[in-house]
Image: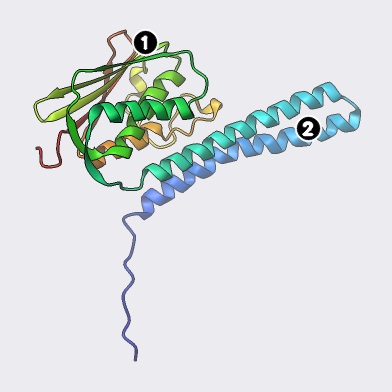
Amino acid sequence: MNETIPIQRSDALMPLMVEFTRGVAHELANPLNAIAMHAELAKGMVARGDAPRAVQLLEHILADCVRSARLVQGLRDFSSAMNVGKVERVLVRGIVEDALLIVSEEASETSALIETNIEYNGEIEVEKGALERALACLVQNACDAGATHVLLVVRADNEVVVFETHDDGSGIPEGLHDKIAKPFFSTRRSEGHAGLGLTLVDHLVGRQRGELSMGLALEGGTCMRIQLPRSVGAT
């Protein structure tokens, strides 16, 4: 009889997979159902010869397609950023510059002024790509929320490097503070936001043995703070 190799069970992952799958299905079902409904109505308007109304319905369909595409892109970004990268020693300024480059390449149009104040430009031992993605997400979140000014500050506190984004937006209501990092929670769902941005940041920061927190910004909006050890050996 051939020797068999036991298959490892994945019970610990199942609750997370079920929750994530349910969330994906729910988020995609809404725009797809709307597309189907508007398409059926548009057929009726075409049959009646009501071209103006049919065009309006087609515009709704196009908007839902854009929303669906944005959700799918959010899932792709989430998936790619979940891959564990190489830990390396890099200068802080390079990380900040590359993070802002990601924002400029991927962001929708924004009139927000984005500035930096790099008080610490030493080295940090980190997954470079993961931290860049996390910082880009915080800056983009502030822009998407209507901020006109976003300040990215980097400073050092002993063996900890602190990255902060300060914006002049309206802030996050107190009742939502415990929900903002939960998967698929978004105050801008109607615009196609997947609600995975801060979930991703929280995961990436935790993977680096860091902390993600929130407070009031210098200009009265929101301050998102990432604290990371300067090196993997720091405590």
The residue sitting at 33% across, 59% down in the picture is: 11
**Circle 1: is it few (<14), some (14-19), or many (20+) Cα within 10 Å?**
many
How many angstroms separate mark 1 from mark 2 (CA)? Answer: 42 Å
Q: Secondary structure at mark 2?
A: helix
What residue type is disc 1 on? Asp
Identify whether 14 is placed above or below 76.
below
Q: How is the image coloured?
A: rainbow
Of 225 and 16, nearer the camera is 225
Q: Where does residue 94 sit, x and y in percent of width and height? A: 29, 29
Q: Where does residue 81 sit, x and y in percent of width and height? A: 38, 42
Which residue is disc 1 drawn over? Answer: 168
What residue type is disc 2 on? Leu
Identify whether 1 is placed above or below 11.
below
> What is the quadrant of the N terminus in the image?
bottom left
The residue sitting at 84% across, 33% down in the picture is: 44
Q: Secondary structure at mark 1?
A: loop
Q: Where does residue 176 sit, x and y in percent of width and height? A: 36, 23
The residue sitting at 85% across, 25% down in the picture is: 51
* Dot 1 or dot 2, earlier in sequence: 2
Of badges 1 and 2, nearer the viewer stands: 1
Numbered mark located on residue 41 in the image:
2
**Circle 2: is it few (<14), some (14-19), or many (20+) Cα within 10 Å?**
some
Considering every residue shown, the one lying at the far bottom of the view is 1
Residue 183 visible in image:
yes
Of 136 and 202, nearer the camera is 136
Q: Where does residue 155 sit, x and y in percent of width and height? A: 18, 21
The tally of labels here is 2
> What is the quadrant of the C terminus in the image?
top left
Res 79 quadrant in image: top left
